[in-house]
Image (spheres, rainbow, N blue to C red):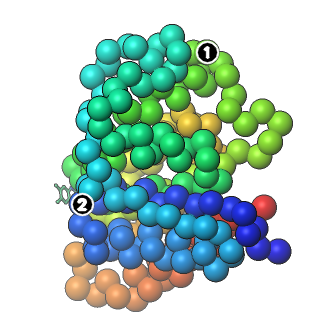
Amino acid sequence: MPDVSARVLGIMGSPRLKGNTAELLEAVLAGARDEGAAVERLDLVRLKIDPCIECRKCDDLAECANETDEMSEIYSRIRNVDAIALASPIFFMGVTAQAKAMIDRCQSYWVERFVLKRRAYEGIERPRGLFVACAGSSKEIVFDPARHIVRAFFAAIDYEFIGEVLLGHTDDPELAPRKAVALEEARSMGVKLVRR
Ligand SMILES: Cc1cc2nc3c(=O)[nH]c(=O)nc-3n(C[C@H](O)[C@H](O)[C@H](O)COP(=O)(O)O)c2cc1C
């Protein structure tokens, strides 16, 4: 049975809004939409998100003190959606600067969960998290540092990490058949994000 009430947020970390990462994220969202979910995509490159300055003001109340930028667009959704697909290409072995700035600004959730030891979803199913990534390199290990970053992000916001859709060697002239497989996988993961 499709879960008609599910809300799925796609967070787009690539500055290239029509690249391979975007196509994979769109396939995830299409899969979720086909399951009846309400789907939304936020492009981080269009939002003003300041980097964390480690002011430590979130240490006491688990709330970020910076209310001057557009991180509120993310904060307002994190506790109000049922799933997030975070998409980023690999830049210098990690996620993009746009994605990392957003993740670092989630330190307040890390404080909430690991310092104040408050669980956001006591007794109910946690929202689900998925990582979508592309890389130029054909080496599988190119995704490893970003995998750790993204798992730490989902742990901090208290989501259940359900997996990843990865497409390597994007500069391969023979990319098309592998990309078609990855797009199918992305669509299936979109369904999995929603089905309970
Ligand atoms: C600044 C920058 C750094 C990059 N660093 C890496 C890297 O460390 N490893 C890698 O495999 N590809 C790297 N790439 C290549 C991208 O990951 C690759 O082109 C990817 O397909 C881009 O995603 P897109 O098609 O969504 O734009 C880098 C690209 C840029 C622009």
Would you say residue 148 is visible in this rendering?
no
Left or right for 10, reference 175: right
**Depicted 194 relative to depicted 94: above or below:** below
Q: Is the CB–ligand 1 distance for label 1 below 8 Å?
A: no
Q: Which one is in front, 122 or 93?
A: 122
Would you say residue 58 is visible in this rendering?
yes
Which corner quadrant of the figure contains ligand 1?
Answer: bottom left
> Residue 50's spot in the image, x, y percent?
26, 35
Q: Which one is in front, 123 or 171?
A: 123
Q: Earlier in the sequence, mark 2 or mark 1?
A: 2
**Depicted 167 relative to depicted 132: above or below:** below
Q: Which one is in front, 95 or 92?
A: 95
Gap between marks 2 and 1 measured at Cα = 35 Å
The image's mark for residue 15 is 2
**Disc 1 residue type?**
Leu
Q: Residue at x 53, y 47 (%)?
A: 77
Left or right for 172, reference 1: left
> Residue 10's spot in the image, x, y percent?
47, 61
Q: Residue 58: which quarter of the image? A: top left
Q: Residue 195: which quarter of the image? A: bottom right
> Residue 106's spot in the image, x, y percent?
44, 33
Q: Which element type, helix, strand or loop, lies under badge 2?
A: loop
The image's mark for residue 116 is 1
**Disc 2 residue type?**
Pro
Asked if marks 2 and 1 touch (Cβ < 8 Å), the reply is: no
**Depicted 46 relative to depicted 63: above or below:** below
Q: Is the CB–ligand 1 distance for label 2 below 8 Å?
A: yes
Image quarter (top left, top right, bottom left or bottom right) of the N terminus:
bottom right
Q: Residue at x 44, y 69 (%)?
A: 25
Q: Residue at x 29, y 32 (%)?
A: 68
